[in-house]
Image (cartoon, grey):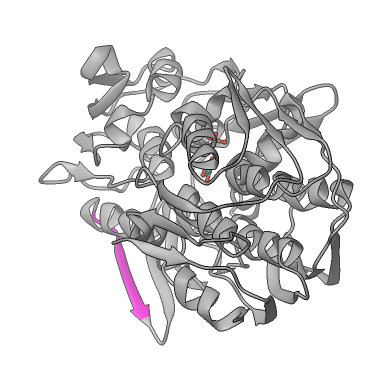
Amino acid sequence: MEKEIKKVSAVKGVLRVPSDKSISHRAIILNALAEGESRIKNFLRAGDTLTTITVYKKLGVKIEEENGIIKVIGKGLKGLSEPDDILDMGNSGTTTRLTLGVLAGQNFFASLTGDESLRKRPMGRVANPLREMGAKIDGRKGGELLPLSVRGANTKGINFFNKKASAQVKSALLLAGLNSEGETVVVEPFKSRDHTEKMLSKMGAKIEIKEGEQYTVSVQQTEKLNPVDIDVPADPSSAAFFVAAAVLVPNSHLILKDVLVNPTRDGFFRKLKEMGAKIQYTNIREVAGEKVADIEVEYSPSLKAITVDREDIPSMVDEIPILAVVSTQAEGETIIKGAEELRVKESDRIKAVVENLRKVGIEAEELNDGMVIKGKQPVKGGVVDSYKDHRIAMAFSILGLISEDGIRIKDADCAYISYPEFYEHLQQVVVR
Ligand code: S3P
């Protein structure tokens, strides 16, 4: 489906964007491994998280919906059952990588595949350390690419330096560590999102964290996890699009309710503040161990360019496309570095962003590990390609709101992967 987004005169109102994708995945996966029943309120119903539910049902977990609440009946750490067919991971890297960690220490065989985009994404970063722990994993290109198969084994803890600071890798190893002899230690140069370790701690796993020059998290082999009820806050990665819309469109004022502002996730909002955007957190509170706030944001005409460095990336890794969109209106040149990871997301996001910016009349340059965007540029408009990547589709929809001739987005419906209601919510807040 193609969508055309035209210039608007303001963005106004109050929105509760859909729930956090990372926490929703983990609420299902971790509770599937617990003993007993848990309830998940405000679960994200979107392409990727529904994939997680389907996959864990195929692994023998009872997951039901009752009055809008998801009920998971956990099977215990060794209680999953052998699936009778290949597990289809759709577009979801998080489901795939975390599940590889879960399957490493079970006592059965499973095969995993995914859609065209997922089958191109690197899995060796998880498969290799899991093999070091004793897991039996094979797949295309020596286990680098899906389809992959796992035969459960007796695994042992390792000490792993997670050079890429990837939360998916860290989570996979911690999940495998629960069923592995001894201790599993993951060290990161910069702390990646910490939802897995937070949730596991609550469930009774022996998690230890050391923060300093580097971030170290360890887990001991665990007998049993207790189920935990979770109320999932709104996803900062989804809120980011509407925050950007309000910052860019004159006369705008928006309130985004119940947004997760965990410091490993709110880097985009902090960077926007540094650029001079008028954003504030109100009603700051803690929900199920996570920091949550309402975000109030308004039109911010005097934005300044910034530099984004390697250490900034983990807390805003999914927000680089929308940050690039905002930087087209900042005074000066915005430089994004240390972001080569973006080349292996749902699309090559460096290439996708720079090519699309050029298609709508913006000067931008690709770097191996990022991009350079010239600021204060008029957005002419035109046709862009989403590359079937949800975050590219949504980022360029927002740019359409300040374009002279409108922006048409090819395959815009891929937004359903994380935000099925995106275009309806956009309709609700724009003033024509
Ligand atoms: C995620 C981690 C991030 C992020 C992805 C979700 C997670 O990837 O890009 O959308 O839920 O663990 P990394 O593994 O690069 O941190």
Furthest-left residue in this view: 84
Quarter holding residue 93:
top left
Quarter holding residue 336:
top right
Principal SS element in the magenta part?
strand
Q: Nearer the viewer, residue 256 or 43?
A: 256
Magenta region: which residues? 60-65
Quarter holding residue 1:
bottom left
Which residue is located at x 36 percent, y 42 percent? 387
Q: Where is residue 82 in the image (x, y as percent from the top left)?
A: 18, 43
Which residue is located at x 40 percent, y 72 percent? 71
Question: Horizontal placement of 80 versus 401: left or right?
Answer: left
Say whether residue 372 is visible.
yes
User: From the viewer's perspective, is residue 415 above or below residue 294?
Assistant: above
User: From the viewer's perspective, is residue 201 above or below residue 340?
Assistant: below
Q: Where is residue 18 in the image (x, y as percent from the top left)?
A: 53, 69
- Residue 104 is one of the magenta-drawn residues: no
Q: Which quadrant of the rendered structure holds the C terminus? A: bottom right
Furthest-bottom residue in this view: 67
Q: Which of 201 and 64 is in front in this view?
A: 64
Q: Where is residue 106 in the image (x, y as percent from the top left)?
A: 31, 35
Question: Horizontal placement of 271 versus 387: left or right?
Answer: right
Q: Position of residue 121 (x, y in %)?
A: 36, 29
Count of picture labels? 0
Question: Horizontal placement of 394 versus 196: left or right?
Answer: left
Say whether residue 173 is visible.
no
- Residue 63 is one of the magenta-drawn residues: yes
Q: Nearer the viewer, residue 348 or 84?
A: 348
